Image (tube, helix red, strand yellow):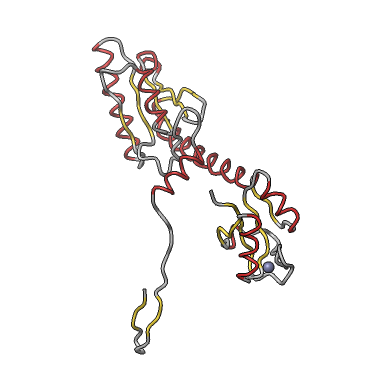
């Protein structure tokens, strides 16, 4: 795409290339989920908290409805996205299962005994359950959402680094690409012929020239493949 400049010439526009599509959603699912289904990072989860009431009698149901709606309102006031699951045709266990599969980060369970002791049970999608007093429910939920978000991010970053090598030599690069593969951060000379040779011999191509925050601590001085001076650190991987 070109545009006419004030001076009358034609110039290319600067385009972004985010590729925000189903791919991005696929990446999210593959990065964070487990054998029980989706794990949605709190910041992106359409529903962050599911409140599941547990009742036997109509009286219990009515009492739980008041408390559940109050907790929901308090959480929404704090900017949390909440569903209060009052469906009558499903048992609590079936509801837990459903919200888990949908990746909802936090579930609040509340039954008659919790009501009597003034507490809810906070269950995390990533594991762990603990009772929380009504008065501190909002603080406990927002803290749990923050912790889950931070833990998912840290785990994803750790996994990426475990599958990456930095500052590789040509020999290490070849061995890595023959094995389980992953990401190689290495110096690149910028020569298309060098890039083509690497692709031909290893199937690996440059995935990205990383921004400063993703680069290795020490900038590579030479091209990992040909030894010429490096013009940029590149991330190499095999596409599949
Ligand atoms: Zn080179």
Q: Is residue 155 above or below residue 210?
A: above
Q: Nearer the viewer, residue 138 or 174?
A: 174
Furthest residue toward bottom: 7
Q: Nearer the viewer, residue 134 or 215?
A: 215
Q: Nearer the viewer, residue 60 or 149?
A: 149
Q: Quadrant of the N terminus?
A: bottom left
Residue 187 screen position, x and y as percent: 68, 64
Furthest residue toward front: 200
Q: Is residue 39 above or below residue 132?
A: below
Q: Is residue 148 left or right of residue 194?
A: left
> Residue 109 appears in which quarter of the rendering?
top left
Q: Is residue 109 left or right of residue 88?
A: right
Q: How many numbered tags mark residues here?
A: 0
> Residue 163 appears in which quarter of the rendering?
top right
Q: Is residue 226 left or right of residue 15?
A: right
Seen at 53% across and 40% down, the residue is 152
Q: Quadrant of ligand 1?
A: bottom right
Q: Is residue 59 above or below residue 136?
A: above
Seen at 50% across and 37% down, the residue is 148
Residue 229 screen position, x and y as percent: 71, 72
Residue 98 screen position, x and y as percent: 37, 26
Residue 143 screen position, x and y as percent: 47, 37
């Amino acid at each position: 795409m070109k545009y006419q400049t004030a001076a009358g010439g034609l110039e290319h526009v600067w385009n972004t290339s985010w590729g925000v599509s189903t791919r991005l959603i696929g990446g999210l699912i593959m990065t964070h989920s487990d054998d029980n289904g989706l794990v949605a990072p709190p910041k992106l989860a359409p529903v962050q908290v599911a409140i599941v009431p547990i009742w036997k009698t109509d009286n219990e149901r009515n009492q739980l409805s008041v408390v559940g709606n109050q907790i929901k309102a308090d959480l929404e006031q704090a900017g949390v996205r909440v569903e209060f699951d009052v469906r009558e045709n499903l048992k609590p266990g079936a509801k837990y299962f459903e919200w888990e599969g949908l990746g909802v980060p936090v579930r609040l369970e509340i039954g008659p005994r919790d009501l009597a002791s003034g507490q809810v049970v906070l269950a995390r999608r990533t594991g762990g359950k603990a009772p929380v007093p009504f008065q501190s429910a909002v603080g406990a939920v927002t803290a749990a959402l923050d912790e889950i978000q931070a833990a998912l991010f840290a785990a994803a970053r750790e996994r990426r680094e475990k599958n990456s090598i930095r500052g590789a030599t040509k020999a290490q690069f070849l061995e890595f690409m023959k094995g389980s593969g992953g990401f190689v951060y290495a110096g690149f000379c910028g020569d298309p012929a060098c890039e083509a040779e690497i692709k031909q011999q290893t199937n690996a191509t440059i995935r990205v020239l990383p921004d400063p925050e993703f680069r290795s601590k020490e900038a590579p001085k030479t091209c990992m493949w040909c030894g010429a001076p490096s013009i940029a650190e590149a991330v190499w991987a095999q596409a599949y």
